[in-house]
Image: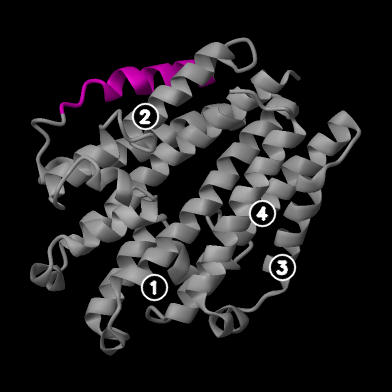
């Protein structure tokens, strides 16, 4: 496969996943902003969301203060924000159009219709109360595209590069969402274990569609150690870091078989996967959850660069 084709497929999948993840991050901020304690500092949660999305500097280059309308527009509709839902869907459609021959008709129609429908939303008339509906729409269209991909594509290198884009992006997002809660949203130790704390954890779990599955695994109220373990180490939770790296190493192993060679990305992904399989949540907390997540996102970004180099991606 040409490097340009591999690059487009990788970023097509990554952009679709990022659009969904941006909607999930926005949902975290919205849900927590609606909690009673947010009245004391109603915009702190949006600052947390911007920090988690890595958009703080870009946001303040455009706006002087944090307001709900500005943050929502910036995260969802602003073409100047390369991580906004608008930019992600535009990039995904552009890559899909460039690789019409490499993807299936169902994938193209799903992506193209998502872009056309998103253009129908008017950010100028969107009220805060309508925000959940828009966020649900983004998540549903991402799921529709992913379903089309999984149900129609051959399990060849096209599939492998799509999987890599999806799960590198998803792992990064799960780490960022978890880090927001633990490092930014709850600076006061006095709130740990209170109803306020529990509501924040519930918001985090719902944002990654893990609220009910958490209850299936843990038959008790929210405990930080359990939630961290669930989102980092549970091999059955499809948004956990361990699950993401299981999919990443699987895709890279298949690429190694297809092309008959391996690269640094194969070794490094296996190291990360093995570390996630052997670590306990107690060890993670001992080293510091924030520090662990920071190291993970750094390694994840390094792996993405190694994949790009190994398979000659060209933009």
C-alpha separation, residue under disc 4 versus residue under disc 2: 26 Å
- Name the residue carrying label 3: 275
Query: For the residues marked 1 and 2, what is the alpha-carbon distance in whole angstroms?
Result: 29 Å
Q: Is most of the magenta stretch helix, strand or loop?
A: helix
Q: Quadrant of the rendered structure where residue 111 is?
A: top left
Classify the position of the C terminus by image quarter: top right
Q: Residue 27, position in %: x, y?
A: 28, 52
* Left or right for 69, reference 20: left
Dots 1, 4 in contact, CB < 8 A: no
- How busy is the neighbourhood of tag 4: few (under 14 within 10 Å), some, or many (20 plus)? many
Q: CA distance from mark 4 to mark 3?
A: 10 Å
User: At which x and y percent is residue 283?
Assistant: 62, 82
| Up-down relation of residue 284 to residue 275 (above or below) | below
Q: Secondary structure at mark 4?
A: helix
Q: Earlier in the sequence, mark 1 or mark 2?
A: 2
In the image, residue 110 lies in the stretch drawn in magenta: yes
Label located before the other in sequence (2 or 3) = 2
Residue 259 visible in the snapshot: yes
Q: Which mark is residue 87?
A: 2
For this rendering, which residue is in front, 169 or 291? Answer: 291
- Which type of secondary structure does the marked residue at label 3 adopt? helix
- Which portion, as a residue range, is magenta? 107-122
The quarter of the rendered structure image containing the N terminus is top right
* Residue under pointer 1: 182
Disc 3, disc 1: CB below 8 Å? no
The residue under label 4 is 245
Residue 274, above or below 155: below
| Callout 2 crowding tier (Cα within 10 Å): few <14, some 14–19, many ≥20 | many
Label 4 or label 3, whichever comes before in sequence order: 4
């Amino acid at each position: 496969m040409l490097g340009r084709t591999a690059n487009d497929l990788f970023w097509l999948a990554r952009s679709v996943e990022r659009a969904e993840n941006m909607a999930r991050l926005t949902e975290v901020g919205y849900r927590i902003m609606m909690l009673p304690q947010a009245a004391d500092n109603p915009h702190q949660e949006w600052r947390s969301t911007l920090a988690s999305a890595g958009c703080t500097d870009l946001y303040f280059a455009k706006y002087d203060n944090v307001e709900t309308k500005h943050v929502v527009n910036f995260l969802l509709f602003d073409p100047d924000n390369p991580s906004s839902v608008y930019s992600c869907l535009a990039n995904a459609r552009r890559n899909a159009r460039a690789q019409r021959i490499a993807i299936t008709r169902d994938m193209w129609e799903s992506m193209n219709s998502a872009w056309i429908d998103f253009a129908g939303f008017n950010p100028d008339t969107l009220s805060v109360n309508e925000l959940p509906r828009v966020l649900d729409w983004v998540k549903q269209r991402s799921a529709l595209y992913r379903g089309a991909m999984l149900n129609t594509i051959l399990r060849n290198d096209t599939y492998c590069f799509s999987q890599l884009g999806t799960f590198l992006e998803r792992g990064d997002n799960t780490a960022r969402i978890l880090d927001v809660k633990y490092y930014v949203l709850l600076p006061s130790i006095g709130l740990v274990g209170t109803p306020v704390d529990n509501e924040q954890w519930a918001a985090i779990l719902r944002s990654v569609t893990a609220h009910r599955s958490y209850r299936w695994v843990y038959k008790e109220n929210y405990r930080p150690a359990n939630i961290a373990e669930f989102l980092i180490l549970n091999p059955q939770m499809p948004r956990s870091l361990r699950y993401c790296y299981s999919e990443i190493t699987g895709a890279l192993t298949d690429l190694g078989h297809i092309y008959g060679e391996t690269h640094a990305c194969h070794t490094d992904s296996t190291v990360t996967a093995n570390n996630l399989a052997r670590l306990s949540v107690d060890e993670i907390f001992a080293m510091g959850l924030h520090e662990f997540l920071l190291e993970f996102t750094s390694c994840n970004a390094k792996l993405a660069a190694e994949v790009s180099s190994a398979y000659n991606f060209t933009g």
